[in-house]
Image (tube, rainbow, N blue to C red):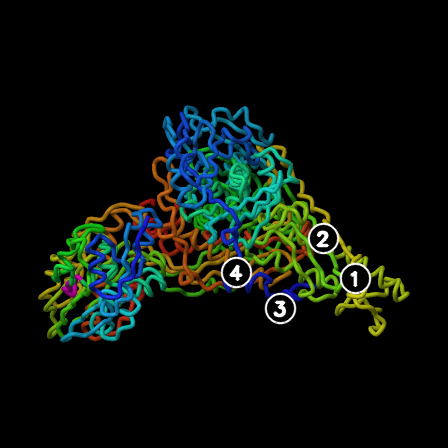
Amino acid sequence: MTRSFTWAVTVEDALAAIGSGARPVAGGTDLVVGARQGKASLPEAIVAVDRIASLGGIVEVDGGLHLGTLATHEEIVANEVIRERFSALADASAIVGSHATRAHGTIGGNVMNASPAMDAGGPLLCFDASATLRSEAGERTVPLGELWTGPGSTTADPHELLVGIEVPAPKMMTGSAYVRLEYRRQMEIAIVGATAVVTLDAGSVTHARVAITALAPTIRRIPEAEAALAGSDGGDEAIATAARAAGTGSSPITDVRGSAGYRTAMAEVIARRAIVAALARARGEQVSIPASAATRGATA
Amino acid sequence: MGAGTTAAATTFIRGDGKEKVTGVGRYTADLTMTGMAYAKFRYTDHPHARILRIDTTKARAVPGVVAVLTQEDLPDVRFGGLVLDRTLFAKDVVRFEGEIVAGVAALTEEIAAEAAALIEVDYEPLPAITDFVAAMEPDAPLIHPDWASYERDEGMVASGNTISYSTIVKGDADAAMAQADVVVKGRYESDASQGVPIEPRAVLAEWRGDEVTIWSSTQVPYAARAGVAQTLQIPEANVRVVVPLLGGGFGAKCDLHFEAQVAALARAARRPVKLVFSREEEFRAIAQRREGIVMEFETGATRDGHLLARKARLVLDKGAYCGEGGFLGQMAAMHACGPYQIDNVFVESYLNYTNHQPSGSVRAPTAPQVCWGLEQHMDEVARELGIDPVELRRRTVIEKGAEGPTRQIFDEVGIKQTLERAVEMIGYDRELPQDEAIGVAVGWWPCMPAPSGAYIHLNGDGSGTIVTGSQENGSGAVMAMPTYVAEELGMDPHDFTLLYQDTAAANWDMGSCGSQTTFNSGRAILAAAVDVRDQLLDAAAAELEVDRGDLELAEGRVRVKGSPDRSVSIASLAEGDTIHGKGSGEVPEVPTGDTGGCVGRLGNETFLAPQLITQAAHVKVDRETGVVRVLKVAAAHDCGVILNRIGADGQVTGGVVMGVGLAISEGTQLDEEGRQRNPHLLDYKLITCSDAPEIEVDWIQIPTAGAGPRGSKGVGEPPQVPTAGAIANAIAKVLGTQVRHLPMTPERVWSASRGVEG
């Protein structure tokens, strides 16, 4: 049972509380829901960081992005820079949970919850984003690929607070998309998800990132898929090879949401849809956000 | 008053609407009382086990605990519907994961939860019987070894773990099958599913002397009262059940449900006690889910589509206890016949105990699953015959004078009209893209005759109070009652208030179940209105010194026909507070048939004034993923004369949406020991508003024998009946193969499309 709940006014207050064992809470959409479901009881001490103004905001920095840890999914979807140049992230934030989750849930909480089904994770990973972690002892930057170690676990120290996420500038002619298999149109959780980020130059793919979601203990990049795309013309054969690699690269579990066999087969389908949408956006074609809705039923 | 011309047909503003949508309405969980304690249950640790020892010492020692109860503390009686097979708290053996071993009341919820966890229980685990077909093998361990000693209805034909065996028999199905040009067989299987009312249940009990008042989120307050009286061994007169606003039920809140345990805790604690369920408890602990069924159909037809014979074998998963669901097997058997003309029938149905949560009435119990299987089977018959599925139904559905599966002769039935209308609304013959198709299904549901009673008091100022035992579950059926009374009395619906869902106020009513509120409670209320009308006419005739035959009631006055200036106001006639009417009306009789050959007769062998339904679904299938989107459902129903169009349309809209969920996304998943694997809304996937299809509704309004007030029949359950079947037939058309497992989840559709049975 929680014995102490404090509201931090400054980052320093928050770090002091975290340093003495409190757990930070922002939107509460994971902590509270998890406690209600009996996954983990609420911590003894909680420090709310949601009123620390300096932790919020979405700022364009040299063509890249600084996402304050308190940026909500709703703010991310509404941000024109993200919609235009980091579309996959907008695709993901647009379909996280419910309207209420998107209004309350923060990107920082989402990243630190380290769920392999986290929608925003694949896009951030494929954009080579890194997490800025701060404690009373100082600050360090960790690439997201090195942050997540398994379902719910990270390399962050318990005394560290995620204060922001830095996303470097993508090259010109980059397109991206995040697509999720959806049993229903709202209130869904990722059962299979895929992200693709591709850069085109004179008709060929010069840079590719492909990641899979909810198909392994962490969100995972698929180097074989990226290799199949990079240097290719982005045509059907390269797409098919890359999508197959996404299937081969998955190691899903069988659970109430689907069997491992179905998920593996869907990894290929969904990865293909994400790659096709990313390529289309790179070419300047319109694929509406979220790409999951735009690509439903799209066949090879 | 003719069809569609009632006041409710054009405007209907629900009396309980504003408080519900503005959040000021009070549901049971919102109630608090001074000194109130909180209840928590200790559930079993094993789905099937013998209890060796229960020690509540540590729980009792927790400061703030005011009562701890086990079955030892209560009268040694069993309860149930057609079989009395359960105790309030587990006695000796636990039989499903939601079984309650003990109850605790404490000053806070946290203390109650802590104390419940401290109760020590030793078990000897027993093998869990979860395969409801294998449960009837001769060597299967018995879930109720003492069954023979239980009190039960004589109609229950039992053997081993089969709690009820029923057959529907007409002619000689085997001989007729041998004569058929075409014989088609099909096997279908449905998972269990849930009603999922948005309000998890809550119960608050308070004693005064030896009388108890229980506020409960129940659909059936009188059944709850009877259950409390029987299990606590007190007179029904000492039990008052009041239902505050009810946040949905869909059948899941039928039957006795925890009112007695909470009342017993309140008596022991000597203070009011409240129980509020979590969502997970609402999934796991209730004894009221939609049952799993394995269905095998065999139909013999002539080349031109005449149905010579139907055989079917159904096995239903009853779960651990009978509850009110003892009739499920026989009801399923009637739906395996469907609203068709079939010369010879042999349907047998096994309702089997398992170590699962008990099954009971959830919106049109058994019908949606069996209809889903049968209607796919009928499409398979059509394919085999080379006849269009709609044409086959056109040739085979029942009509006036046709003979039912037990030789009941039908009066006017509008099934053929519903078929034509649904096909027209959906645009059946349209060209569609390759991944889209239209499927059609027909179904039926009986009217449920039952007693009811109502009072109407006219107050001294001319306003009126309607006292009814009927229960509002959100459908608006009770909310529409003032309109009918006002029409009968020439008054304004706003002249009336309702006193309802309080067992101390009115006499017995079946409750919000069986689509019976307008049918039975409406009949009683109209009879009471006629009584009031008679009294007003007598009083006015004396006052105006005219023959009462010359009088009419209109605009709040009793006036002389043709001379509207000669009149007296109803308010002035009511001044002395002497106008009060009562009524019950005559309960329609269930039609007779030739049921002599049927085994396990429980009252559903014939259908009174059946409600008849055709629904057509237009779906789009993402072949690569198996994800199905239902784009449109056209629903044409013969529910008799529609008294309240807005309310009736609302029932179809909700029922279709619920049917879509049943068809493609819901379904309880169970582990090897019978525990639910998805007892929460993240993984028990109700469809959302965004998934809801366009829904077009129309009504075939024809009078029929045995109908309810003003020619009406029920409307609440029918929309649930053929929705999944219509969707299934559309999916099969896209895939070129049937999906034989309900719900037709994306993975099952995907598997079927690859030739693998899901």
Q: Amino acid at mark 3?
A: Thr
Q: Output the chain of dot 3.
A: B
Q: Output the chain of dot 2.
A: B
Residue A126 as seen in the image, left or right of residue B77: left
Which of the two residues, B454 or B53, is positioned nearer the viewer here? B53
Which of the two residues, B100 or A50, is positioned nearer the viewer here? A50
**CA distance separating discs 2 and 1:** 15 Å
Which numbered disc, 2 or 3, marks the residue closer to the eye?
2
Image quarter where the C terminus of chain A lies is bottom left
Which of the two residues, B577 or B452, is positioned nearer the viewer here? B577
Secondary structure beneath label 1: loop
**CA distance separating discs 2 and 3:** 27 Å
Q: Amino acid at mark 2?
A: Tyr
- Packing grade of label 1 (10 A; few <14, some 14-19, many >=20) is many
Which numbered disc, 3 or 4, marks the residue closer to the eye?
3
**CA distance separating discs 1 and 4:** 49 Å
Residue at 43% x, 32% y: name it.
Answer: B95
**Residue under circle 4?**
B422
Q: Are marks 4 and 2 on the same chain?
A: yes
* Snapshot quadrant of residue B576: bottom right
Residue at 41% x, 29% y: name it.
Answer: B55
**Residue under circle 1?**
B574
Task: Tell me which numbered mark, 2 or 1, is placed earlier along the sequence.
Answer: 2
**Residue under circle 2?**
B455
Total of numbered circles in the picture? Answer: 4
Residue at 26% x, 73% y: name it.
Answer: A79
**CA distance separating discs 3 and 4:** 23 Å
Range of magenta residues: A125-130
Position above or below: B609 against B539: above
Secondary structure beneath label 2: strand
